[in-house]
Amino acid sequence: MRRARWIPLVLMVLIVAGVGGVYYLQKRIQQAQAPPPPQPLPMRLNAVAPDWCVTKSEGARPIIDICAKQFEQVKDPPRMELQGVELHLYRDSAKEFDRVRSAKATYIPDQATLYSEGEVEITRGVPVQGTPKGQLMVIRSSGVTFDARTARATTDRPTKFEFDLGGGESVGATYDPSVRELHMHSQVKLDWRGRGPRPQPMQLESGELIYKESESKVYLFPWAKLKRGGMTLETAAAVVSIEDGAIRLVEAQTAKGNDVEPRRRMDYQAQGLTMWFNAEGVMEKIVGNGKARLMSTTADGVTTVNSDLLELNFAIAGKQSNLKRALASGHGEVASNPAPRKTGVTPQAKLLKSETIELEMRPGGEEIQQVRTHNPARIEFLARRKGERFRAMDAERLTIDYGARNQIRSLQGSNTSTWTEREKQPGKPAPPPARTWSKGLEAAFDQKTGELEGLHQWQDFRYEEGERHARANDARMDPRQNRISLDGQARTWDPQGSTSARHIDMDQKTGDFAAQGDVFATRAAERKGKSSSSPMLSGDEPTQGKADWMTSRESGQVVTLSGNAVAWQGANRLRAKQIEIDRKRRKLAAVDNVASEFLDRGGDKAPRQSAPVYNVITAAKLDYDDATRLALYTGDVTLRRPAMVVTSQILRAYLNDSSKQSSLEKAIADGKVVILQSAPDRTRRGTAEHAEYYTGEERVLLTGGAPTLTDSLKGTTTGRQLTYFAQHDRLLVDGQERAPAISKIKRR
């Protein structure tokens, strides 16, 4: 019984031990299966958390989401260290947001700023639902500070950005989504590709850039450089306007640029420059304002346009833009400096000035087709090489047509004037310029040399070259021959005289001219007291003339009148089919139906106040030499004096000084001479082969061919030589040997 009592006790011990073992075993199992206790927080942190997110909203509209894969809240200074950061900044519509990603960032609650020292990626315009249309703008940089209150991001580090229309880079950038503005701080480079299957990209460089999305404008300053294809633009500042993703407008300040093509280079500049582009990015128009300048260079030369305002319009051919029209307004100037030709000839340089000048280009934009002015204009043909003349034309309006190789073909003007300088001869003073005026003008130019080959002016034409003048209804000039043809009420004059006619053809170099149709000419009186002065070429009175034709040579010293010619000085007159007056050699000649009239007051013995009388001589031909005062008449000559007529084949008339009362000193006739004197009560008729008449003595000498004198009162006398004195009614007969004189005298 005693041995049985400890069995329950042992069982109890075993049970207790078993239960205890099971308990400890279970406890160990539980301890083994329980999670480890959390590590104690470092002293600098208040909290840590994985997969941390914070959302800020206004009602149902989200404003900002910030998430991080790891979150640490630092005690001092208070801040949050985030890893694997992604920030969503929602736009007003809440359908898009701007996304900011960074491997590591620091958030400072007191300042509400997020800063990332490492690389940051900003993606603009991410749709909340669906996939984006095209490539979104992505900005990559480092050292970025993000303001959580304004969502403004900024950095001073190198920044790159990409978008569907291009990409670029800068040093430093700021993005403010509240105003949708991107600011590139410095060293900006931007490649704008544009849209389309084959877009023509534009490269932009600038010191600074601001892109205002709300305005669709890019501001470049304080300098900018734009390049597209062969076009380059450099400017102090510029504004680029964007429409539907394409650059449509560039507004630049203090700009200069160029457009280089295989066969042409175009340079332009202005204080303000505006450029328009089409949807494909091809240039349509350029406007330069303030000291605007365009210079077009081709193999044919250089054309330069200057004005206050310059407008260039382009024709679009695919991806190419060609200059179609240029309009220069305000102090406009177009200068043309042609290149030397292969022939060795270089066309003359030209300068056109007007307030408004319009240039129209040929297709392709390389050559000028026409130039028009809308205000008074002046074109100058510059003398830069030996042999070239300076010419200038002024007009109320000018139209210039061009041929090939930018060579002027013709020029038209209204209310015009011209100025032509003559070539200066060595050792001589500069000759006076030739000037013209007219209502209308048209000029033609040689297409090979570029020289003026013809000038036509009409309606109230006037000409002036020193003391030489002219005018007409119509004028044509041949500059190569130095000739001007005047038509319609034509007149030319200088201090020595004037000529009018229906038509005058004049040599500009020498002053020689030919006149035709109703010619009337006058020559001023020469210096008085000239020793050689005579009635035929008197220096005391002006000479006048009329004819169907007239020529003037040797500065007007030699004048020829043809066709019903009449020349006169005072009361002295000469008629013939042709009259030539040579004042230089002091000679005169007349042919065909010659008739001369010389004033004669009745001889040296006549009273001073007696009525004037004339010596009238007709013949087939007249030659006069003032050195001898001999007038030689030939061919059916007739001399008529008061109460006397002399006919012969040849007559030599010796003239007195023009100061004498009688213009005729003596007359010597040869060949079938007949002298007829008449008075109311008697007549005398003398015949011979040779006769001499002396006016002072009124003496007649007849010789040769059986001279005969028949007096109606005294009969007929024949002898070898007969001398008759009219004043004394005395006759001398000198008979030949063995042939005494035969006289038949009527007795009263």
Image: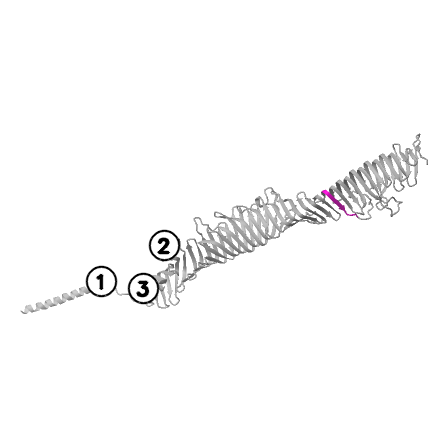
Residue 607, given in percent of the width and then of the height, sits at: 88, 47
Q: Secondary structure at mark 1?
A: helix
Residue 40, given in percent of the width and then of the height, sits at: 29, 67
The numbered disc on residue 49 is 3
Q: Are marks 1 and 3 in contact (CB under 8 Å)?
A: no
2 or 1: mark nearer the eye: 2
- The rendered magenta stretch, by its main secondary structure, is classed as strand
Up-down: is 652 above or below 227? above
Q: Secondary structure at mark 3?
A: strand
Q: Amino acid at mark 1?
A: Gln
Asked which quadrant contains residue 675, the reply is: top right
Q: Secondary structure at mark 2?
A: loop
The numbered disc on residue 131 is 2
- State the residue at coordinates (82%, 43%): 598
* Tally of marks: 3
Tell me the distance, in whole angstroms, between the alpha carbons under discs 2 and 1: 47 Å
Return the disc, 1 or 3, that comes first in the chain's sequence: 1
3 or 2: mark nearer the eye: 2
Is disc 2 surrounded by few (<14), some (14 to 19) or many (20+) residues within 10 Å?
A: few
Q: Amino acid at mark 3?
A: Ala
Tell me the distance, in whole angstroms, between the alpha carbons under discs 1 and 3: 24 Å
Residue 93 sits inside the magenta stretch? no
Q: How is the image coloured?
A: one colour
Magenta span: 516-526
Instruction: Answer with left or right where residue 195 lies relative to residue 456.
Output: left
Is disc 3 surrounded by few (<14), some (14 to 19) or many (20+) residues within 10 Å?
A: few
- The residue beneath circle 1 is 33
Looking at this view, name the residue that lies furthest to the right: 748
Instruction: Answer with left or right where residue 637 lies relative to residue 147.
Output: right
Residue 427, given in percent of the width and then of the height, sits at: 71, 48
Q: Quadrant of the C terminus?
A: top right
